Image (spheres, helix red, strand yellow):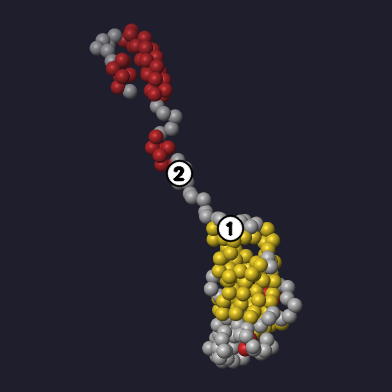
């Protein structure tokens, strides 16, 4: 605007020149206005900074969930045994097995690798057998025995006949599986020379959990 004013300023005040001078001032003003308009950005920079949508920082992809398989003992295959109703069992049921009895459960491994195996069970024995362990639970895979076994401990403190509804976890065992269907067998063994029908030689199996830990 100052440039327009300087261009139009004149020391002479001849009335005859006023129309011509007005025309020249209008032309100069129009030209400078066009130059000024072209030199301005289409949008103020401050508006771009204030109202631009923020770009979120890239997020790391969530870690894949570890495959876990749960097998219910009462849903397995067994020649002898009895399904028991237990309010604290994972599916409100267990499989009651005595020494010499077993159960086989089918499982499908989603991928090859090493899996941990944990057995949930209950045991209501009144006291440990005087001549040795009362119940040993052994693990076999696809009909082949493994070196994995555990002694079924007494699972409660209320006393004989009341602790079947209290559950323990076995030690964690590791097995290697290929992808596909497999058969997992748990068998119950008692101390040598004891009657397999003795309640002190029985254990209730609730569920088996397998977790893929590494390839």
Q: Residue at x 30, y 22 (%)?
A: 2
Q: Residue at x 64, y 60 (%)?
A: 109
Residue 193 image-quadrant placement: bottom right
Give percent across and percent down for residue 147: 58, 70
Q: In this view, does 28 lie above or below 156?
A: above
Q: Which of 124 and 49 is in front in this view?
A: 124
Residue, disc 1: 113
Q: Which residue is drawn at 46% across and 43% down?
A: 55
Residue at the far front: name it.
193
Q: Can residue 70 be seen in this view?
A: yes
Dot 2 or dot 1: first in sequence order is 2
Q: In this view, does 180 lie above or below 198?
A: above
Q: In this view, does 188 lie above or below 115?
A: below
Give percent across and percent down for residue 135: 60, 82
Looking at the figure, which quarter contains the N terminus?
Answer: top left
Residue, disc 2: 54
Q: Is residue 167 left or right of residue 85?
A: left
Q: Which residue is drawn at 38% across and 37% down?
A: 46
């Amino acid at each position: 605007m100052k440039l327009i004013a300087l261009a139009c300023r004149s020391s002479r005040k001849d009335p005859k020149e006023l129309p011509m001078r007005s025309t020249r001032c209008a032309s100069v003003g129009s030209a400078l206005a066009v130059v000024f308009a072209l030199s301005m950005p289409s949008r103020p920079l401050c508006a771009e900074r204030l109202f631009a949508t923020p770009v979120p920082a890239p997020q790391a992809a969530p870690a894949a969930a570890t495959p876990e398989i749960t097998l219910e003992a009462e849903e397995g295959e067994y020649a002898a045994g009895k399904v028991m109703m237990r309010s604290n069992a994972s599916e409100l049921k267990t499989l009651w097995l005595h020494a010499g009895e077993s159960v086989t459960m089918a499982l499908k491994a989603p991928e090859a690798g090493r899996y941990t195996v944990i057995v949930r069970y209950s045991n209501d024995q009144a006291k440990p057998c005087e001549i040795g362990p009362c119940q040993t639970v052994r693990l076999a895979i696809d009909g082949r025995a493994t070196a994995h076994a555990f002694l079924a401990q007494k699972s409660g403190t209320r006393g004989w006949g009341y602790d079947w509804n209290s559950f323990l976890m076995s030690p964690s065992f590791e097995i290697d599986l290929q992808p596909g269907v497999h058969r997992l067998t748990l068998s119950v063994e008692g101390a040598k020379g004891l009657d397999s029908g003795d309640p002190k030689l029985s254990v209730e199996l609730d569920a088996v959990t397998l977790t893929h830990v590494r390839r």
